[in-house]
Image (spheres, rainbow, N blue to C red):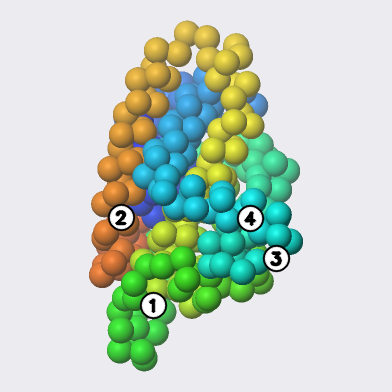
Amino acid sequence: MGLIQGVTELFPISSLGHSVLVPYLFGWHNIVTSETGSESFFLAFLVALHVATALALLIYYRREWIKLISAFFSSVRHRRITTSYERLIWLLIIATIPAGLMGLIFEHILRTQFAKPLAAIVFLFINGIILLVGDNYARRQARARKDFTMATTAEHTAKELTAKRAGLIGTAQVFALLAGISRSGITMVSGLYSGLDYEDSARFSFLLATPIILAAGVYKLHDLVGPNGNGVRGQILAGAVVTGVAAYLSVRFLDKYFRNKSLRPFGIYCLAASSLMLLLGLARGHF
C-alpha cells in the first residue's frame, strides 16, 4: 500500500481510488469496511502515507520552495508583487484555498459515502475520460502553435496564469476528494485549459500538491498518534518509508516525462483498470 500510494498520488490515476480498489482486489475485507467508518486504523495509516508523500515533494522541490517562501515574505514586506516567484507563490496560495476549505467541510462526508469499490470504479472511469479529453485539447493547442513543449520556468507559469485561473484550478481539485478522481490529473488538465503546457502544468500541480497534502496530513495527525494508530504503528512506519521513496522517484520521473509526453497512457489505464474491476465485482456478485 505504501508503494501504491507513493506512485498513484503523483501519477494522475488517483491514490484515493487505489486505496479503495486494491484492498477490494485482494479481498482485505476489514480494510474495505474500515474506509467508510468515522474512525479507523486504516485512516491513521493513510495519514502517515500522505505526510510521507508531501515530504518527498518538499525535498524534491526544495530549491523552488526556498525561492517561493523567500518571495512570499519579500512581497509581504514590500506590499507589492514584482518578481515571477512572488506572483507564483500567491497563485499557489489562491489555488490552495478552495480545496482546503472544501476538504475541511466535506472530506468526512465524501469519504464515508463514496469511499466504496463501486463508486471508486465509476469515478476512476470518469477520471480516465477527463485525462483523455485534456490530452486531446493539449494536442490541438500544440498543433496550433506548432510547439508541443516549452521550457519550464516560473516566469512562464506566472505569465500564463491569472488569479482567476489559479482559483479555478484550485476549485477543480475539490473533485479529488472523490475516490477515483486524481488530484494531480484534474489539476494538470485544468492547467492545460488555463494556457500552460504539459511541463508547466505538471510542475504547478506538484508544487500545489505539497501544501495541500501536507496540511491534510497534519490536520489528521491525531488519528495517527491517537487510539486509531494503536497496534499498527509498525506497519505505519514501514508504509510511510516506502511511500516517501516511491513518491520521490515518481516525481523525479514525471518531472522529466511531461517534458515531451502526454496524459493519454494514464487515461487509457484508468479506463482499463476501472472496467476490469467492474467485471471482477460482477463476477463476485457484489454489484
- Type of residue at label 3? Arg
- Type of residue at label 2? Leu
Whether residue 228 appears in this view of the structure is no
Q: Mark number for residue 74?
A: 4
Q: Which residue is mark 1?
A: 138
Q: Secondary structure at mark 2?
A: helix
- Rate crowding at label 4 as few (under 14), some (14 to 19) or many (20 or more) other CA atoms within 10 Å: some
Badge 1 or badge 3: first in the primary sequence? 3
Q: Which residue is mark 2?
A: 254
Residue 59, image x, y percentages: 40, 40
- Type of residue at label 1? Ala
Q: Nearer the viewer, residue 187 or 67?
A: 67
Q: Nearer the viewer, residue 217 or 264?
A: 217
- Quadrant location of the C terminus? top left
Badge 2 or badge 1: first in the primary sequence? 1
- Quadrant location of the N terminus? top left
Q: Are marks 4 and 1 in contact (CB under 8 Å)?
A: no
Which is in the foreground here, disc 1 or disc 3?
Answer: 3
- Distance from label 1 to label 3 (Cα)? 33 Å
| Residue at 42 percent of width and 45 percent of height | 62
Q: Which residue is mark 3?
A: 80
